[in-house]
Amino acid sequence: IIIIIINKLYNTYYKMVTKRKETKKRCIEGKHSNKTGHLKLHCK
């Protein structure tokens, strides 16, 4: 049972990290273009 809980937590954490990397990447790409209206909000 403990393994299942750890697995769930790990999956959630992994998704969060992946999403953050995606956002950061999009942020960097956004900075190179002039269309950075809503992207700057995510980029901190």
Image (cartoon, rainbow, N blue to C red):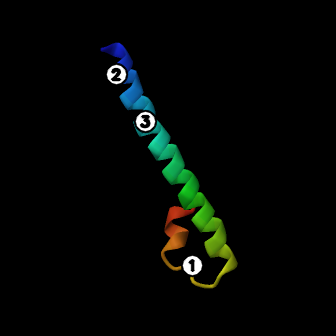
Foreground label between 1 and 2: 2
Using the image as rendered, state which of residue 2 and residue 29 is in the foreground: 2
Question: Where does the image place residue 16, in percent across and percent down from the top left?
Answer: 46, 45
Where is residue 2 drawn, in percent x and y? 34, 14
Kindly identify which residue carries mark 3.
11
How far apart are labels 1 and 2 at the CA level? Answer: 41 Å
Spatial CA distance of label 2 from label 3 is 11 Å
Q: Identify which amino acid the numbered label 2 is placed on.
A: Ile
Q: Disc 1 marks which residue?
A: 36
Figure quadrant of residue 34:
bottom right
Amino acid carrying mark 1 in the image: Thr
21 or 40, which lies in front? Answer: 21
Callout 2–callout 3 Cβ contact below 8 Å: no
Q: Residue 44 versus residue 15: which sits nearer the camera?
A: 15
Q: Could you classify mark 2 by the number of other residues whose Cα lies within 10 Å: few (under 14), some (14-19), or many (20 or more)?
A: few
| x, y percent for residue 19 | 49, 52
- The answer to whether residue 26 is seen in the rendering is yes
Q: Residue at x 66, y 67 (%)?
A: 28
**Element class at badge 2:** helix
